[in-house]
Image (cartoon, rainbow, N blue to C red):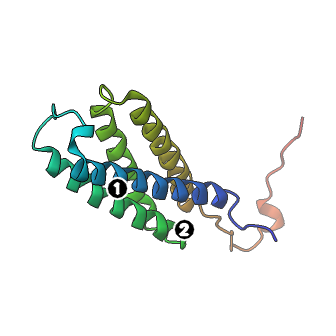
Amino acid sequence: MTDQHPRRRLVTFGAVLLIVGGAFNVLDGVTALVKPEHFNDDLLFSTLTAWGWFFAVYGVIAALIGIAVLRGSMVALWPGIVLAGFNAFTQLADIAHYPAWSIAIVVVDMFVIYAFAVQGMEMGVTEVQDEREAPDKTDRVLTTSR
């Protein structure tokens, strides 16, 4: 069985990574809510509880968008790119506390962005058949080949 879109496997991989990244965010959020002493309390703003709820909800949304892409939604590609980019940015804010974890999630987000962007750019490419009639013999242009 051949795939009509050769890059579809790459999108499937990106969708699975978005779901995994969403699960990581849910894990971070639940950990911040249940065991706040695990995290440092020097946040950019707000409280650890607010950050915990944010990442828990954010992770669920990311996982749902990943599932939508797996089910074939082309519209979900672009919100997936935005979510992965925003997640990479928020993980960079936490890189001082947990560098290996943050870098791993940023790498996952970059793979998601690449996979979804390649498919999104491919959506804009269409082949157009020229439906004009063949030119008359008087309209021919002679070319030379080298």
Position of the C terminus by quadrant: top right
> What is the CA distance from the residue labelled 1 to the residue labelled 2?
20 Å
Residue labelled with disc 2: 70
Residue labelled with disc 1: 26
In the image: residue 111, left or right of residue 145: left
At x 29% / y 33%, what residue is drawn?
94
In the image: residue 114, left or right of residue 137: left
Q: Position of residue 48 (x, y in %)?
A: 16, 44
Q: Position of residue 24 (x, y in %)?
A: 41, 50
State the image quarter where residue 2 is shown.
bottom right
At x 36% / y 52%, what residue is drawn?
27
At x 54% / y 68%, what residue is drawn?
70
In the image: residue 67, left or right of residue 46: right
State the image quarter where residue 99 is shown.
top left
- Assess whether mark 2 and mark 1 are in contact (beta carbons under 8 angstroms): no
In the image: residue 17, left or right of residue 62: right
Q: Position of residue 11 (x, y in %)?
A: 58, 58
1 or 2: mark nearer the eye: 1
Element marked by disc 1: helix
Q: Which of 13 and 73 lies nearest the eye of the viewer?
A: 13
Count of all numbered marks drawn on residues in the image = 2
Mark sitting earlier along the chain (1/2): 1
At x 35% / y 63%, what residue is drawn?
60
Relative to 118, residue 104 above or below = above
